[in-house]
Image (tube, rainbow, N blue to C red):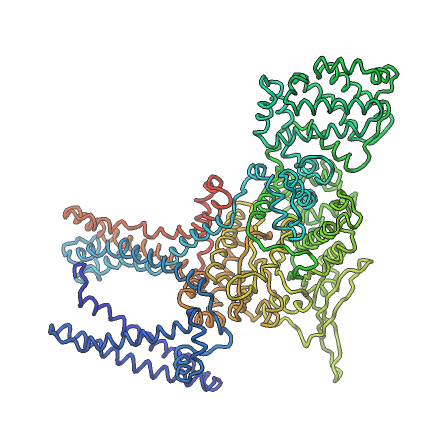
Amino acid sequence: HHGKINISTIKVVLSAGPAFFILNFIECCLDVLLMFGAYKTARGFAISRLVIRFLWLAAISTFVTYLYVKVLDEKNARNNDSTYFRIYVLVLGGYAAVRLVFASLAKIPACHRLSNYSDRSQFFQFFKWIYQERYYIGRGLYESIGNYARYVIFWLVIFACKFPFAYYLQIRPLVVPTNIIVQLHDLQYSWHDFVSKGNRNALTILSLWAPVVAIYLMDIHIWYTLLSALVGGVMGARGRLGEIRSIEMLHKRFESFPEAFAKTLSPQRISSRPVPQDSEAATKMYASIFSPFWNEIIKSLREEDYISNREMDLLMMPSNCGTLRLVQWPLFLLTSKIMLANDYASDCKDSQKELWHRISKDEYMAYAVKECYYSAERILKSIVDGEGKLWVDRLFQYLNESIGRDSLLVTINLKKLQLVQSRLTGLTGLLIRDETADRKAGVTKALRELYEVVTHEFLAPNLREEFDTWQLLLRARNDGRLFSNILWPNDLEMKEQVKRLHLLLTVKDSAANIPKNLEAQRRLQFFTNSLFMDMPEAKPVSEMIPFCVFTPYYSETVLYSMSELCVDNEDGISILFYLQKIFPDEWANFLERIGRGESSEEDFKESPSDTLELRFWVSYRGQTLARTVRGMMYYRRALMLQSYLEKRYLGGIEDGYSALEYIDTQGYQLSPDARAQADLKFTYVVSCQIYGQQKQRKAPEAADIALLLQRNEALRVAFIHEEDGVSSDGQAIKEYHSKLVKADIHGKDQEIYSIKLPGNPKLGEGKPENQNHAIIFTRGDAIQTIDMNQDNYLEEAMKVRNLLEEFRGNHGIRYPTILGVREHVFTGSVSSLASFMSKQETSFVTLGQRVLAYLKVRMHYGHPDVFDRIFHITRGGISKASRVINISEDIYAGFNSTLRQGNITHHEYIQVGKGRDVGLNQIALFEGKVAGGNGEQVLSRDVYRLGQLFDFFRMLTFFYTTVGYYVCTMMTVLTVYIFLYGRVYLALSGLDHSISRQARFLGNTALDAALNAQFLVQIGVFTAVPMIMGFILELGLMKVAPFVSLETYFYRVTRDHVFML
């Protein structure tokens, strides 16, 4: 109608009515056919509903079709009679109104109370039953009105983008060229054609329209991807992700970390103590809370060989509980600041105020100068007595008075400041060592040299004369008593202060790149960034939710043996040699830790302890059970530290501890109270399904598991024990027991529980059966499911109390039943393929799941999610184990939780490490398994129930993130083939050249443009936008740009699996 809308246009559009009813009738017919064979076992209500729907839809579809035919007759008759049209509109409007009412009652959250009230009427009950079958599993599958509006608006925005795009850029540009091509009769074919001759160029039209139709069917997935990237990016920015993305940012914001830590990771009883009005005193109080935890994190990095001893000294933070009058920051923030301040002082030609203003522009330089001054004063006063102490007291009295009067530049000679520094450095260099007679004499000599420099070169002439004429000091000098009696700094606090002053004075190189190791940088950056993210208040350890970590294991590597480390592969490279080359700094730190220089494999064999350390060092860099156990046991270590300090914080001085003692963490792992509290709140169960068989055949894996039990007293191992038995009739049978063991004080397996099983428990898929038999041994209110190739970090374990409090938080109309946790894929440094895979997976477990949780369709994907234990063990467990159909067993826990009125959330202030496949074959097999598992999900009753009970908009999200994802991926590839074959047909037939010539002759640019629409088939590249957006958010644009092109290609290629196979 030439772009005009009139009554005829409306009548054509209303043809959707008969199409809708006929499609519903066809669906009902399919239900009748597919139910064949199940009628004998089906419930009477189900069969009667099927019959009623069949009769109703047959009648209504026939009636509506008849009415529409009459409407078309009226249109063709060209008369003014529109009786049938009015009846038709009335019928459709009435039916639409009834459907809208029932849809509102069933789907819209605000109408659920009215829906429940209407169930009292049998009339409404009957029609609701016809509209939607009653379900026990899946009842109440709705969200709050706010969440409902959120995902409805999300999809309305997608539709508002898709349909104009499809109309203006796909369909409309082809309409005019199509009409022209249909009317072209003098086209020259290059080869004989049997189809297009005489039928208005049908294959030509098909070649143009087929790619457009294919894109139209799948581009909604592209729009979902783009909008999810935008929404996920905004959510991440609002959640303050990526605020600290470099070591420079960490340096600049370190001053704000103690307060943030105290307010987020410390219980309210500690963080809400009265804060001093003085800002520096308040910062010092927060620093005293923060420092022991920071120091334990640094120690853990050293134990893992990510940093060296020198880096550890620079990163450690003083307790800030002493009498020093300022906040003491880690030395890596203050190194080289004293040298720069000396340069400023030497060049100073202004007043004291101008000099201090110049120094204070760098706040850490100001901290370094203050600390150096106060530390020197305190150390000098503590190591001398008699006349020497009087000289020190008088000297600093004059200096303090001069500073107070802004006349310091008159009192001292700044040109000699570096000379004073060199003498003080010599003194501290002696004091940091152990006390001997020769060193005491050396300290006396160093003090006298310092005295001479300060008195005769550093101070102003008037003060110099005053000290020279001081009779008491003069007699002591003449008698040789000055500084003769040295009080060596033997207490821990003073020794640390001397060492710290020495490092302040001597470390000249910048610490801008400390720590040097990229993994250590990443971990510290994420931890400090998370301190500013929104998380629940931490409860004291005694009041936190108890939890258990649960890991299934079959026969994977537990601990590498020396033979495995030293055997060369086909390329002549051993595992140890390979790791030494890709982790050179960590290898050097490891040798430093065990006290060795450059050593060969043969050197390690001489020392059993070093050999064992080497095996663990290599195993901690692979995807081994040893790495997973070490990581998960950090939970216990963190809880012991938190319990130990909380008891002292809350008891404090009242329990007889001094200010320094109650902050000291030395020996906290041996505290009976802290150990007992941690064991009450945390358990770790590894389900080693065939551990019993491995022990019987003396497999090396069994010995390695026993070694892990000995090294980790809180570790428990569950396994299935097989033994020969005799039945009641005397026949030999196999008996199966599910057992739980731990290591006793002698390192032997001690049986805790043994449960006799009715038979072999392995009936379905191995991993879920492994979990199901051992879940009875878990305890606590929450379970964190951890795969065998995962890792954890001490700094992240400190946040587990906050995470568990999410179970009590407000996340909609229901409390959470699964808490989603983000992952860091640690295998990215192994190879280029591993790097691509890690970035692709990181995108999914961060931005992807962030958006899924926002749209209320996040499930469980085999990641380190935390389950409400009581909820799930009373509703079928955490995984399903049926063969083949449950090959992707983890996601069924999410289906199960959602169908049973659960609530799944996602949280990104805490992360767990994860290993991924690193070879091309492994990656392809993994993606094939995921795609095949998704194909099996289509056949499952869980997906059927979700499809029946989700509302339309929530179902769209669920479809395009599960089954629809693979359908659209397949369509993306097929579209390229359709386009290329169409282009081949146009090129070989000569129509491409012939139509282009006609277009130029007619001056029709639209016709020429229609033949060059290849840009449409390239929209599949946009599926990589979420990955790019996620890394821009967390790493910054400049770091992301180099790998965008390669990773975009990899992201698409590795997921092109035809899941239906």
Q: Nearer the viewer, residue 783 or 690?
A: 783
Farthest residue, direction right: 479
Q: Nearer the viewer, residue 483 or 961?
A: 483
Q: For residue 450, which quarter of the picture?
A: top right
Asked whether the viewer can see residue 916, the reply is no
Q: Residue at x 57, y 58 (%)?
A: 863
Asked whether the viewer can see residue 269, the reply is yes
Number of numbered markers: 0
Q: Nearer the viewer, residue 268 or 568?
A: 268
- The image position of residue 264, as x and y in percent, is 61, 50
- The image position of residue 874, as x and y in percent, is 61, 72
- In the rendered structure, the answer to whether residue 890 lies left or right of residue 180 reads right
Indicate the quadrant containing the N terminus: top left, top right, bottom left or bottom right.
Answer: bottom left
Q: Does residue 383 lie above or below 644 as drawn?
A: above
- The image position of residue 822, as x and y in percent, is 55, 54
Indicate the quadrant containing the C terminus: top left, top right, bottom left or bottom right.
Answer: bottom left
Q: Nearer the viewer, residue 1018 or 800?
A: 800
- The image position of residue 1016, as x and y in percent, is 32, 52
- In the rendered structure, the answer to whether residue 934 lies left or right of residue 26 reads right
- In the rendered structure, the answer to whether residue 480 lies left or right of residue 287 reads right
Q: Residue at x 83, y 30 (%)?
A: 488
Q: Residue at x 74, y 78 (%)?
A: 732
Q: For residue 449, which quarter of the picture?
A: top right
